[in-house]
Image (cartoon, rainbow, N blue to C red):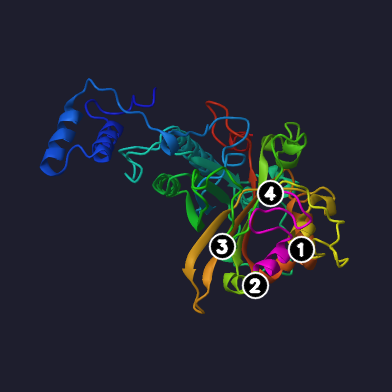
Amino acid sequence: MTQHDHEPQGVSRRRLVSTVGAVGATGLAVGATGGAVVQAAARDDSRAPAPLTSVGSTRVAFHGRHQAGITTPLQAVGHLLAFDLSAGAGRKQAAALLKRWSRTARDLMADASDPDATGAAFDAGPCSLSVTFGFGRTFFSRTGLEKQRPDALAPLPDFSGDALDKSRSDGDLWVQIGSNDGLVAFDAMRRIQRDADGTAKLRWQMNGFTRTPGATRKPMTMRNLMGQIDGTNNPKPSEDDFAARVFVPASGSPAWMANGSYAVVRRIRMLLDDWDEKSRKEQEKVIGRRKSDGAPLSGGTENTDPDLDKRGADGSPAIAADAHVRVTAPATNGGAAMLRRPFSYHDGYRDDGAPDAGLLFIAWQADPLRGFVPVQRKLDRGDALSRFIRHEASGLFAVPGGAAKGEYVGQRLLES
């Protein structure tokens, strides 16, 4: 089936929208005359539909070795959802749900507009939509699959800086939705929620955002709400050990996790009012990078490796001992690294007037015990940034490899 085979005979939704856009852009018609021009153009079935361009036309593949939404370029809008299986729902019902979810994700990622769905994305293209599915630790006991639970899914240790809301943490099932259009992302979220009805109930939901593609003069690493460039030291696909750091090997254990990954999800509130009271120089000392371009305080450009041994004219370290970039550097953590793919969030204002805003931290790794845990333990012992953030929710999820054509996500687990 081609992109437009599902459209009814006559006027296609996209052709009508494109015609309206063209008329409005050229200013050829206004008022009643404009309506007549649009109607006449819409009735002219000999005209080929105008193709989607730019953001609307971009697609992410559903099928593949890995699930989408891990190495997919970060989208402008994200929704994170966790579900708990309903009372009486077990392995059979969970398998049926993952089949529905996989079918919905596959169809929406191919072409997000569907006149029989919510209507929110009625005339939009896929807009780089991706949908990713994972399993929490409790999923395995609720489905009788304890023997298939990975050792890497052991509960994360407690950290002294945590102030976790248990109702917004963990969950049997986890879904990540990303898109470069807010309506497309919302439509996908509603479809996923509706598919779960009767089998799983929503435990928590978080909504995030980042820059829209094309908003900067050139492609740039994202900035967080503190104004800092965030993600410079991410592992890069061009690096020889990228796959080993991010994905479970094909020969890994358990077998159903082959080519999968583990997602650590943390809701981190930023104390933005306290942060904004600091001068730029003080902020840069906390992070260890220049705010303007992300370059380390030891010199160079954003992608220059920090020189942790360099000292200033006064003999003090160019990068402070407790600077965030020093504490998190792989060189100071036995090589531990994660692929961070976060969204910012803003949930209004607190009773004290401070913004309830921060980072939806999502870190991907082949093994959280060798990725997130050692880095977070070190941050817990002495990170200057910890004075300006609060970890308020947490989750760890096993994200299986991608589904081949004819398969659904999680099939190798649920039909093992």
**Residue found at the very far left of the displayed protein:** 32
Is residue 65 left or right of 204 when viewed as pictured?
Answer: right
Q: CA distance from mark 4 to mark 3?
A: 29 Å
Is residue 45 left or right of 85 when viewed as pictured?
Answer: left
Q: CA distance from mark 1 to mark 3?
A: 30 Å
According to the image, label 2 marks what residue? 278
Amino acid type at circle 3 is: Arg
Amino acid type at circle 2 is: Lys
Q: Which range of residues does the magenta coloring cover?
A: 280-302
Say whether residue 298 is magenta. Answer: yes
Marking on residue 323: 1
State which tag comes first along the sequence, 1 or 4: 4
Decide which of 93, 39 is in the foreground and name it: 39
- Residue 203 lies, with reference to residue 24, above or below; the image says below
Amino acid type at circle 4 is: Thr
According to the image, label 3 marks what residue? 168
